[in-house]
Amino acid sequence: DSKSLNNKILNIINHISYCEYQGMIDVYNEDYFAKQHKKVDSAWATYLDEKERIKKFNERERERIQLVIKNYADQPAVVAALYRTDWKKNTDYVMNILDNLIKKYPSFKDAKDMKKDVTTYLVRSKMLENGKPAPAFSYPDTNGKNVSLASYKGKYVLIDFWASWCGPCRQAIPQVKKLYEQYKNKGFEVLGVSIDKDKDAWLKAVDEENVPWVQILTPDIRKTQTDYMFSGIPTMYLIDDEGKIVDKFLGYSEETEAKLKELLNNL
């Protein structure tokens, strides 16, 4: 029956995620022990390419979830599979499935809720397109004084959304420092916006990193993440001298730095 089938679909989805998660743990463990024994056997550590191996696990999970969606697109449980995909990259496809589900099951709340999420995402995406005004905010700095994004008007500012507990965020800071030193005399600023829940941990990290730019702490993490549409950090936005979005960057890579330098060289 329908209930039994949907339970089966949910079990398949959970099993796919469980298998891939366990596989990723094995990859991390192998990488860890290979590095521990690098002095004895460097070939093992050299052979292992953690990033590519993790990427393969993610791709395999994505392929299997897509197969579930394809085969069970007309079943309520498929909403759980849709949430496991990167639905933001294929909203038309997802909306079509949701509309069909709502038509078939008019009282199906999960499908309606996801459709609301997708609709909200599309609206927010339009508002955060390059060239659109950056959402306004004003948060307290390390001394408790409110600092607004509007106060940077007339300068290009890189908003760095980060947190003390985020390893990649902390690793990016020394690179951003170099960028700041190179362009600060050309009207370029950096503004650190932390999503820390622990104020003391944030203050400790700010002190440890000793950054030359202003650091502020959002009192409403969910609103900040909703306004600027991010979940992973570091996420960065380059804002121009009129307060408009120039570009968005997920993480801080060599490609990110090259793109920023290309934009800033035009100042």
Image: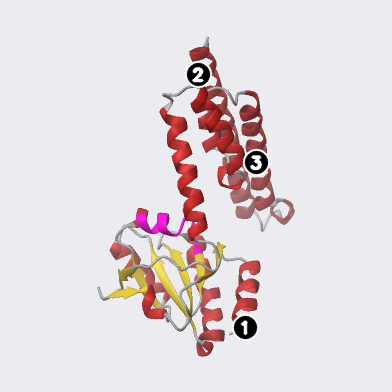
What separation in Å lies between label 3 and label 2 (alpha carbons)?
A: 25 Å
Q: Which label belongs to residue 57?
A: 3
Q: Is residue 90 above or below residue 108?
A: below
Per the image, label 1 sits on a secondary structure element best described as loop
Q: Is residue 232 magenta?
A: yes
**Which amino acid type is marked by label 2?**
Asn
Task: In the displayed orientation, state which residue is furthest to the top.
Answer: 1
**Which amino acid type is marked by label 3?**
Phe
Q: Is residue 197 left or right of residue 178?
A: left
What separation in Å lies between label 2 and label 1 (alpha carbons)?
A: 57 Å
Neighbours of disc 1 within 10 Å: few (<14), some (14-19), many (20+)? few
Q: Which label belongs to residue 241?
A: none
- Quick one: label 2 or label 1, which is nearer the N terminus? 2
Foreground of the two, 144 or 35: 144
Which label lies toward us, 1 or 3?
1
Neighbours of disc 2 within 10 Å: few (<14), some (14-19), many (20+)? few
Residue drawn at (38%, 59%) of the image: 224
- Quick one: label 1 or label 3, which is nearer the N terminus? 3
Where on the picture, by quarter, is residue 73? Answer: top right
Q: Which label belongs to residue 7?
A: 2
Q: x, y (%) of residue 244? A: 49, 72
- Quick one: label 3 or label 2, which is nearer the N terminus? 2
Residue drawn at (60%, 54%) of the image: 36
Foreground of the two, 121 or 36: 121
Tell me the magenta residue range.
223-235
Q: x, y (%) of residue 85? A: 57, 39
Picture colour scheme = secondary structure
According to the picture, the residue beneath numbered tag 1 turns out to be 266
